[in-house]
Image (cartoon, rainbow, N blue to C red):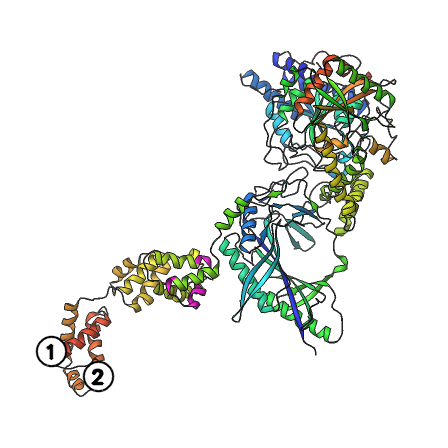
Amino acid sequence: MPDFAPVIGLEVHVQLNTATKMFCACPNRFGDPPNTNVCPVCLGLPGALPVPNAAAIEAAVKAALYLNCSVSSFSKFDRKNYFYPDLPKAYQISQYDLPIGTRGSLEIEVSGTTRRIGITRIHLEEDAGKLVHAPGASLVDLNRAGTPLLEIVSAPEIFSPEEAYAYLSSLRLLMLYLGISNCNMEEGSLRCDANISLRPAGSSTLGTKVEIKNLNSFKGVQKALAFEIKRQSSLLATGTPIVQETRLYDAATDKTLSMRSKEEAHDYRYFPDPDLVPMTFSPEYLARLRDNLPETPQHRAQRFVSAFGLSQYDATVLTSDPALASYFEDTIAAGASPKLAANWIANNLLSALHQTSTSIGACKIRPPQLAALINLVETGTLSSTSAKTVVFPAVFEKGIDPNAVVAEMGLAQVSDTTQIDQWVVDAIRANPDVLDSLRKGKVKAVAKLVGSVMQMSRGKANAALVSQRIAAILKDMHGIEISG
Amino acid sequence: METVREWLNALRTGECSARDAVTTALERIRTVDPQLQAVIAIDPERALAQADTIDRQRAGGEDPGPLAGLPIGIKDVICEKDVECTCASQILKGYRPPYDATVITMLRRAGAIPVARLNMDEFAMGSSTDHSAFAITRNPWDTNRIPGGSSGGSAAAVAARMLPCALGSDTGGSIRQPAALCGVTGLKPTYGRVSRYGLVAYASSLDQIGPLALTVEDIALLLPHLAGHDPHDATSANLPVPNYPAALFQDLRGVRLGVPKEYFIAGLDPAVETAVRSALHLFARNGADCVEISLPHTEYAIATYYIIATAEASSNLARYDGIHYGWRAPESTTLDEVYSHTRRRGFGEEVIRRIILGTYVLSSGYYDAYYLKALKVRTLIRQDFTRAFDTVDAIVTPTSPTPAFALGEKLNDPLQMYLSDIFTVSVNLAGIPGLSVPCGFSPDGLPIGLQILAKPFDEMMLLRVGHAWQQLTDFHLRRPPVCATSFSRPTTHA
């Protein structure tokens, strides 16, 4: 069987999280009762007119700049005409030949190799409504109609399902960094269609492409593409031509099924929307937006390594979510040591968030509290064990001040040498056999003294200090050297 | 009590209450309209309720607005909250918009009272008002003739003195041509001058709402309450609204009038040509400079218009699919049947013809040859006017090549009907304002209209020239046979 190489292009729709819809003042909100966030404009009533949402246009331009697109000074909206019950005007306001951004790119990393994937275009459009199919009837919910939508089309430069996964993860992260979308696939605020064709390995001509829809997770995209590669390879291997068609992914079976062939493809009769005036972007406006773009995740991770001395791994984990990265920086700003903060966040905090399915935004322990906790350990006021097992869980659950927990539960360590010396002397006195053992070279017997001190202090003695003082007293008062 | 000024005077002096005004208008409609069928619907209760509010305000010392109590007719293409708006189409039968058009909001704020929904060609497509799904409106000067269109109901209602004024819409001449054919005054404002929000779209880049009345003075009184920037219409101009009535105090001296040679063509009715030529003499005798100009791309205007207008219409009218509102063909079982049966039976022939034309010119493979080419020619037509206005202040032309034609005469000859827009469509393509004023009568006693054009947003010039014209002539004051006797007094009720 000859080797076939896949060529993949991804079409991603990102719903913008603007307060209002693309062309009217209705709330842009998910999850409300059907047909409650609607008005004459998004219902497509006769005579109603669209007025573009400046915030959505700005978000689209920022996204284009962030994805290294060229943004021309002139862009316009076009009508895409087709009949469907979820499309009340029977046309979608979209962009055709003059999209907001063109020729951008995105960096992905797959098994240690970094590649740059081209972005063909990025344009702004309005979302359609939703059909709800009930027995004997189909219902139309137009709450979603008119939601601002960014369509981001990659170049056919993705060569494996793993790269597709990496592309989507990277794109999602960039959108989260920009703060323009919630990128929540379950709520449909990030959606993806994939185009895939196969060609003999080494060939430079493209094969017949198949479009896959109904992809509801990044893993689903990866699995659907893997299935398609297998399906198309075996067809090509037997000389069967690939049919250009749209296929639906079935998450239950990880297979794709034919939906419709391209012969029924629509003629969308695009033309400039006469209800809207073209958009113009001055060089000053574009420069201002470009200057105020957020740091990219890669830059931020690099900065965490160079400025805070974090490992590349910790830096990557901490920058995998802009809110987490900000949390980390806020914790440092509140006085915690960067390395300790990184350890606490990457280990204790993330696992606690994960176990309780809490987002970093909803996390009750805020950066100043975490910094305070870290400092209690670093100054020796609190033992590392107590911090992890007692204080952190309490603060995580209730969002209270760690100092208060320590005080309330009497967890403060005793680091007073006079007190510790007293306990050590008492411990030696109570365990005369230890001295004999030590004189015989059984150094491990010291543990008995430590245990005794801890018992007398009810665990509050600073363990490091206790070991240090035992060694000093054994030497000074009994002439026994145990260290070194 | 016929002109807006006369009605407003009677209302202001208290000679006539708002309730009297509405009652009078309704009574005139009841008396005259059966012969003309200009009115699609009236809602007396609603109009009287608004009138009573105004009367109460006035009695309580409040200012009910500069147009308080003035009855106005609304072309059935402009949305009024909770009032059936059919666009004279079966497909919108029973449709009641849940919102007011911006012009309705503005008129109400000024105190005007919408009293009647006026007939039109279905979806404003036509030049005769015999393409209405409900009734054929007749010309008040000869009831065997059409009133023009598409705002034929508006023009006929004003000409027959049923109402002092009405709103129309003009996409290719739909205010000016019926105004000319019915002997009234009609203004198509500059594109963007009046909000289109709430005007059911035919061709969005050409549509504009405007007033029809008996005199230019009346138009000047109404326009301030229609014009202005509307944040709900992205194509509305954010420019100050001039004091339009001030234009009435300027005469013709020093005004340069251009006469485009391309508008005096074969097919121009001799009576129309004579009336327009004598108008030019009168203008010249009264201080205006009349010069011949050229608008070289005029011959392409009709073709350009019918490509752009139908392309936009095919998209604008796609929403009438029987799914969300309006009429649905009853026995459809599949989704495709709902679409095809509803649209095939809900739309009239002319609307279907234009949808198909528009669909064709936008289709893949034809777009460049038709739609894109038409956009380029549109630019040339616009440039013709820009160049002309470098040397003249206004342009004067016939409004329509002929007086009113007979009912049904062009029903089966759409091309002939399209040609009756030959002098008006360029104006919409260029986006400039145009005014039609009565300028004479044919040997058959049919009114003839004179069209005056000006630079974008220079409605002041139109009002100045038009008013000066009406100071020199009385064509606009002559009454059609249906109301040969004057309605002099308001109907008063105890």
Give the chain of mark 1: A
Q: Is residue B384 left or right of residue A23?
A: right
Of B428 and A457, nearer the camera is: B428
The residue carrying mark 1 is A477
**Mark 2 neighbour density, 10 Å: few (under 14) some (14–19) many (20 or more):** some
Q: Is residue A298 left or right of residue A397?
A: right
The CA span between labels 2 and 1 is: 17 Å
Relative to B24, residue B316 above or below: below
Relative to B115, residue B481 above or below: above
Q: Is residue A38 left or right of residue B37?
A: left
Identity of the residue drawn at 61% across and 69% down: A160
Does the residue at mark 2 contact the one at mark 1 (Cβ under 8 Å)? Answer: no
Of A319 and A408, nearer the camera is: A319
Give the chain of mark 2: A
In magenta segment, residue A313 = yes
From where the camera sits, is residue B86 visible? no
Quadrant of the rendered image containing residue B82: top right
Question: What kind of secondary structure does the magenta stretch mostly adopt?
Answer: helix
Spot occupied by residue A305 in the image (x, y as percentages of width and height): 41, 64
Direction left: furthest residue: A477
Residue A443, label in figure: 2
Spot occupied by residue A63 in the image (x, y as percentages of width and height): 55, 53
Identity of the residue drawn at 74% across and 56% down: A265
**Magenta part of the chain:** A307-323
Quadrant of the rendered image containing residue B426: top right
**Mark 1 neighbour density, 10 Å: few (under 14) some (14–19) many (20 or more):** few
Of A89 and A320, nearer the camera is: A320
Identity of the residue drawn at 68% across and 56% down: A135
The kind of residue on which mark 2 rests is Val
From where the camera sits, is residue B380 visible? yes
Spot occupied by residue B51 in the image (x, y as percentages of width and height): 63, 21
Identity of the residue drawn at 28% across and 57% down: A404
